[in-house]
Image (cartoon, rainbow, N blue to C red):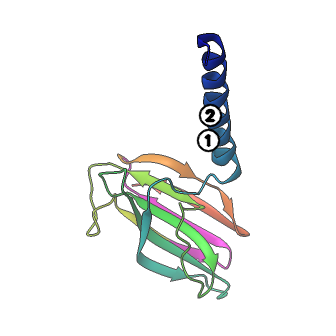
């Protein structure tokens, strides 16, 4: 094969591989390239019994530290094996028994949740409205 033709083929193959990876990333952002595991720490049912606020840790092969995450899911549902839909934090000065930053959950109404967290922890996600519930965050 001529060097010019070989170069064109290699560039074409590289473009297809890069394009496929970009497509996968945007099509399935929760598809783990390395396996991850969620471990439930606590579950707080909403006062009206329709939702559960679940505090959990998520450990992936690519991460070394334990973070604290919160998802709101239907009452009694299994925690999905993906990143939280409400709150994600890591680091901080106050580590909880499970190894992640200190986080506590309290329902203040049928659709109102308060998440209290370590003010020194890094926050990567803090959604205000999830699954029809309003979430208030307190750094304390």
Classify 76 as above or below 23: below
Q: Magenta part of the protein: which range?
A: 106-119
Kindly report the secondary structure that dominates the magenta region of the rendered protein. strand
Q: Residues within 10 Å of mark 2 (few under 14, many from 20)?
A: few
Q: Is residue 70 left or right of residue 95?
A: right
The residue sitting at 27% across, 59% down in the picture is: 95
State the image coordinates of residue 101 (x, y, percent, origin top left). 34, 57
The residue sitting at 37% across, 50% down in the picture is: 62
Q: Which residue in the structure is indicated by mark 1?
A: 21
Magenta stretch encompasses residue 19: no
Farthest-out residue, front: 1
The residue sitting at 48% across, 80% down in the picture is: 43
The residue closer to the viewer here, 93 or 86, is: 86
State the image coordinates of residue 63 (x, y, percent, origin top left). 35, 51
Contact, mark 2 vs mark 1 (Cβ under 8 Å): yes
State the image coordinates of residue 61 (x, y, percent, origin top left). 36, 56
User: How far apart in space, not on screen, are marks 2 and 1 (Cα)?
Assistant: 5 Å
- Quadrant into which the C terminus falls: bottom left
State the image coordinates of residue 128 (x, y, percent, origin top left). 65, 56
Q: Is residue 64 left or right of residue 40?
A: left
Classify 36 as above or below 53: above
SS for dot 1: helix
Q: Which residue in the structure is indicated by mark 2?
A: 18
Quadrant in which residue 22 is drawn: top right
SS for dot 2: helix
The residue sitting at 33% across, 48% down in the picture is: 91
């Amino acid at each position: 094969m001529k060097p010019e033709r070989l170069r064109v083929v290699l560039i074409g193959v590289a473009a297809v591989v890069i394009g496929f990876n970009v497509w996968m990333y945007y099509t399935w952002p929760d598809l783990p390239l390395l396996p991850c595991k969620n471990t439930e720490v606590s579950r707080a049912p909403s006062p009206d019994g329709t939702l559960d606020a679940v505090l959990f840790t998520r450990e992936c092969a690519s991460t070394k530290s334990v973070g604290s995450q919160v998802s709101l899911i239907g009452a009694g549902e299994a925690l999905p094996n993906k990143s939280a839909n409400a709150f994600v934090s890591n680091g901080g000065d106050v580590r909880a028994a499970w190894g992640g930053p200190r986080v506590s959950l309290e329902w203040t109404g049928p659709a109102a949740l308060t998440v209290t967290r370590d003010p020194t922890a890094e926050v990567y996600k803090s959604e205000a409205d999830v699954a029809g519930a309003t979430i208030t965050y307190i750094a304390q």
